[in-house]
Amino acid sequence: MVNILMSGCNGRMGQVIAQCVSERSDAVIVCGVDTYTEKKNDFPVYADFTAVTEAVDVIIDFSNPSALDGLLKYAKENSVPAVLCTTGYSEQQLDAIKKASESIAVFRSGNMSLGINLLIELAKTASKVLGTDFDVEIVEKHHNRKIDAPSGTALMIADGVASVRSDDPEYIYDRHSVRKKRDKNEIGISSIRGGTIVGEHDIIFAGDNEVLTITHQAQSRSLFAVGAVNAAVFLASKPAGSYDMSDLLKERY
């Protein structure tokens, strides 16, 4: 049985993960940390990591980048692995995460969906085959309460495509301020925010007289919860280091 500390337990995803864990026999949430300490589940909720007294095997974090410092401090002091599902980290925070992975196991992914990670592999294959003759555009859509843009998933997709190209790709987020022809090495990334869209990502390969589009639609937040809990169970027994969804997929599939 894996004992989980749920960071951001009272948020939307925190509640979905709590429900997901309650239906499993291999994991249990023993406590939560949230700035809003109202008790919504049958585990204690603390305002700060320093108040946690329970024995914890792994942390799942679906909160806010501002919680990172306290989370990493607790994780390193108590040798607790961490699954980081939060997006929107600064470069300084990413450096801190990398440094922490030298002493604890850290699993980080901008998207916990199996389908999204498969989409990235398909996009990399398409980019290898189509080369620089096709322009690449990524369009992501999310609900109107999402704060960061572009999404962490859109950046994951862009990084995947860029990793197999040889033309030093440049990410372009805003075209309205520059009036010029599109450069061949550009990867365009556009963000849409509205309504209750859970998450949609399109990657468009546009060539002469033909267009290839690969699409993923998340229809429920439960798919991210399942991925996060699977990552926590996977990470609980791992040595220090950096892990992501590709490591989980290799072990399971």
Image (spheres, rainbow, N blue to C red):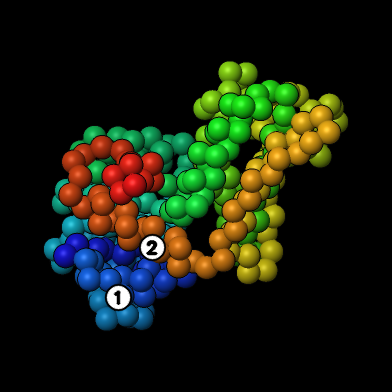
Q: Position of residue 23 (x, y in %)?
A: 31, 75
Q: Quadrant of residue 53?
A: bottom left
Q: What's the residue type where badge 2 is placed?
A: Val
Q: Position of residue 177 (x, y in %)?
A: 80, 36
Q: Is residue 184 left or right of residue 164?
A: right
Instruction: Indicate whether 69 appears above or below 175.
Output: below
Residue 203 visible from this viewpoint: yes
Residue drawn at point x = 44 percent, y = 60 percent:
224
Secondary element type, mark 2: helix
Q: Position of residue 190 (x, y in %)?
A: 69, 45
Residue 152 visible from this viewpoint: no
Residue drawn at point x = 54 percent, y = 25 percent:
164
Q: Nearer the viewer, residue 90 or 113?
A: 113
Rounded to the nearest whole Å, what is the CA distance between mark 1 and mark 2?
A: 12 Å
Secondary element type, mark 1: helix
Instruction: Assess disc 1: are there few (<14), some (14-19) or many (≥20) residues with their C-alpha within 10 Å of its C-alpha.
Output: few
Q: Quadrant of residue 126?
A: top right
Q: Which residue is mark 2?
A: 226
Q: Nearer the viewer, residue 192 or 8?
A: 192
Q: Nearer the viewer, residue 224 or 60?
A: 224
Q: Which residue is mark 1?
A: 22
Residue drawn at point x = 49 percent, y = 45 percent:
118
Instruction: Assess disc 2: are there few (<14), some (14-19) or many (≥20) residues with their C-alpha within 10 Å of its C-alpha.
Output: some
